[in-house]
């Protein structure tokens, strides 16, 4: 059974704080690691897809890194804003052909 | 200009009934998916179709039958609904089967079985 673990499960920060969370995935048969942002009452929205060990991607204040050898990815948010409040999902794509999602990290940013 | 739209948004029905959920994407994508968000909030793949052909069927009971009349549509028909089928079902699409292709999700259909 392939497991994708995300930590922490939830996070409460103040506006302006920087934060990060972790996604752990199998280190063998790696094809890609996806990050999605899921706001309440909306659908998951793709943030990043990373395929190479050492990849770093950035979109505005959000960035992600990838270590395929040890099986983890970090998502960083710099200067959190209330509109960053959402659940952040990662998903592992291996040779099995489908995405295996973690449970997500729920971020709440207080003004 | 909704990219992936699924209907209905909510579905409340009795145990034993048959129901369908429709999904359409206007992105010109080749690949479509159905996911179930289970009680523990995990998104789990049920089916994937590529160019109208079934690619993945993740040991879903055969009461669930997907149908893809064309590349832009992937409907989900469920026979003899059971209490355990209550969940949120998400449709998604991607350009193709490539691992690097992000998936685009619909807003979900909340199915409640009475």
Image (tube, coloured by chain):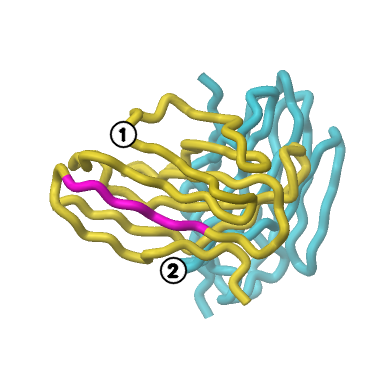
Tint applied to chain A in the drawing:
cyan
| Residue placed most toward the observer, A30 or B25 | B25
* Residue A94, above or below A49: above
Q: CA distance from mark 2 to mark 1?
A: 28 Å
Tell me if residue B18 is in the magenta stretch.
Answer: yes
Residue receiving disc 2: A41
Q: Which mark is residue B63?
A: 1
Subunit ID for the residue under disc 1: B
Subunit ID for the residue under disc 2: A
| Residue placed most toward the observer, A12 or A26 | A26
Magenta highlight: main SS = strand
* Residue B2, above or below B86: below
Tint applied to chain B in the drawing:
yellow
| Residue placed most toward the observer, B46 or A106 | B46
User: Residue A32 in the image: x percent, y percent?
Assistant: 74, 36
Q: Residues within 10 Å of mark 1 (few under 14, many from 20)?
A: few
A84 relative to A70 in the view: left or right: left
Tell me if residue B5 is in the magenta stretch.
Answer: no
| Quadrant showing the N terminus of chain B | bottom right
Q: Which mark is residue A8?
A: none
User: Residue A3 in the image: x percent, y percent?
Assistant: 54, 27
Give the magenta part as a residue range: B17-23
């Amino acid at each position: 059974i392939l497991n994708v673990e995300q930590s922490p499960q939830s996070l409460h920060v103040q506006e302006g704080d920087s934060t990060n969370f972790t996604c752990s995935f199998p280190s063998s048969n790696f094809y890609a690691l996806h990050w999605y942002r899921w706001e309440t009452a909306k659908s998951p929205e793709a943030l990043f897809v990373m395929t190479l060990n050492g990849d770093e991607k950035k979109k505005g204040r959000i960035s992600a890194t990838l270590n395929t050898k040890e099986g983890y990815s970090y998502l960083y948010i710099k200067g959190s804003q209330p509109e960053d409040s959402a659940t952040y999902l990662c998903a592992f794509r291996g040779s099995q052909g489908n995405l295996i999602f973690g449970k997500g990290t729920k971020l709440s940013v207080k003004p | 200009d909704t990219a992936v739209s699924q209907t209905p948004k909510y579905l409340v029905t009795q145990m034993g009934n048959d129901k369908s959920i429709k999904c359409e994407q206007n992105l010109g994508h080749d690949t479509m998916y159905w996911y179930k968000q289970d009680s523990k909030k995990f998104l789990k793949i049920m089916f994937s179709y590529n160019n109208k052909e079934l690619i993945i069927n993740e040991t879903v009971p055969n009461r669930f039958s997907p149908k893809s009349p064309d590349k832009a549509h992937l409907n989900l028909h469920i026979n003899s609904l059971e209490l355990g089928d209550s969940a949120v079902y998400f449709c998604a699409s991607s350009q193709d089967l490539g691992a690097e292709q992000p998936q685009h999700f619909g807003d979900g259909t909340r199915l409640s079985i009475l």
